Amino acid sequence: MPSLVNASAFHNERLSYQIIYHLGIIWKHAGSATLTLTGNGNNYDAQLAARTISWADRIFKVRDTLSCSIRKNGLLPLRYVKAAHEGKGIVHDTVKYVYDNGGNVTAQCIHHRTGRDPQHITLHSQGRSLDMLSVFYYIRTIDFSKMKENSTSEITVFSGRRKETLRIKYAGIEEIELRDKSRHKAFHVKFAFTQDGQTKSSDDLDTWISTDSSRIPLMLCGKLPIGEIRCYYAK
């Protein structure tokens, strides 16, 4: 596993993002997202809220809220909730983490889709295990300056009703341009998701993390069936 910097150094923050649809020469503002973190005693409370704007609603409406509680000591997630309204479907997932002294992790999951009975699922893992929100805080603690370019590591992610393997690949330092034309040096990190380490289970993601001490996610890019979605940090 990669070496980590101080995981208890996060301060209260509110990060805003513009969501852009990109296809060829088309760059169109499609929505917005806000990522917030607040200290709560021995824990952090984090939330990611994303929504599309009116023109994009007519194609594929998104109203997503992810929230989690993370223990400051060791940056261990305790609870994760996903409330997703995407297209015509509404999904609500809850994951509660249980740790033992042997490094084993149990995820007690409830998956509920509108019109169907809730599914109660128990998943198991060993070592550090995350979800689709806490993973973004974890990668901000990785000391990429001590990693070789193209080096990889793997970690377990609980996505609500299934266990996935996330491969994290460090692709080096790049200079990127944000929507306000400002340029920044950033660590380029690639995410690839599989089940059983073989079957692709989620779309790949690319993210760029600032090289300064804030380690702010500056840009995220994900492929769509047609085109791609980019999220740009907008302060």
Image: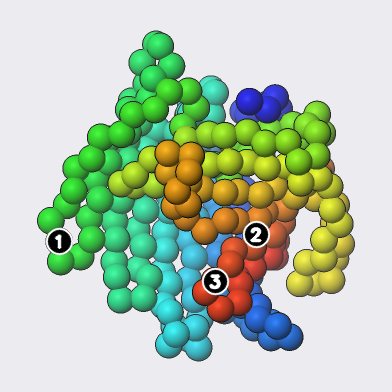
Q: Distance between the residues labelled 2 and 3?
A: 13 Å
Give the mark toward the camera: 3 or 1.
Answer: 3
Point out the tag, 2 or 1, that comes first from the N-terminus: 1
Q: What element carries label 3?
A: loop
Q: In which quarter of the image is residue 175?
A: bottom right
Whether residue 87 is situated above or below residue 132 in the rendered picture:
below
Q: In front: 189, or 51?
A: 189
For the residue marked with disc 3, what is the amino acid?
Leu
| Disc 2 residue type (three-letter) | Leu
Q: What residue type is labelled 1?
A: Arg
Depicted 58 relative to depicted 77: above or below? below
Residue at 80% over, 34% down: 148
Element carrying mark 2? strand
Q: Does 102 appear above or below 133? A: above
Looking at the rendering, which quadrant does residue 115 occupy? Answer: bottom left
Furthest-left residue in this view: 117
Quadrant of the image containing the C terminus: bottom right
Instruction: Look at the numbered discs 2 and 1 and tell me whether their residues touch, using CB distance below 8 Å.
Output: no
Q: How far apart are marks 3 and 1 (CA)?
A: 27 Å
Residues at discs 2 and 3 in contact (Cβ within 8 Å): no
Q: In this view, does 2 lie above or below 174?
A: above
Q: Name the residue under label 2.
A: 220
Q: Return the residue at label 3.
A: 224
Determine crowd level at label 1: few under 14, some 14-19, many 20+ residues with C-alpha closer than 10 A: few
The CA distance from mark 2 to mark 1 is 33 Å
* Frontmost residue, 146 versus 69: 146
Render colour scheme: rainbow
- The residue to which callout 1 is attached is 116
Residue at the (65%, 81%) spot, across then down: 23
Give residue 34's mark.
none
- Residue that extends furthest to the front in the rendered view of this protein: 198
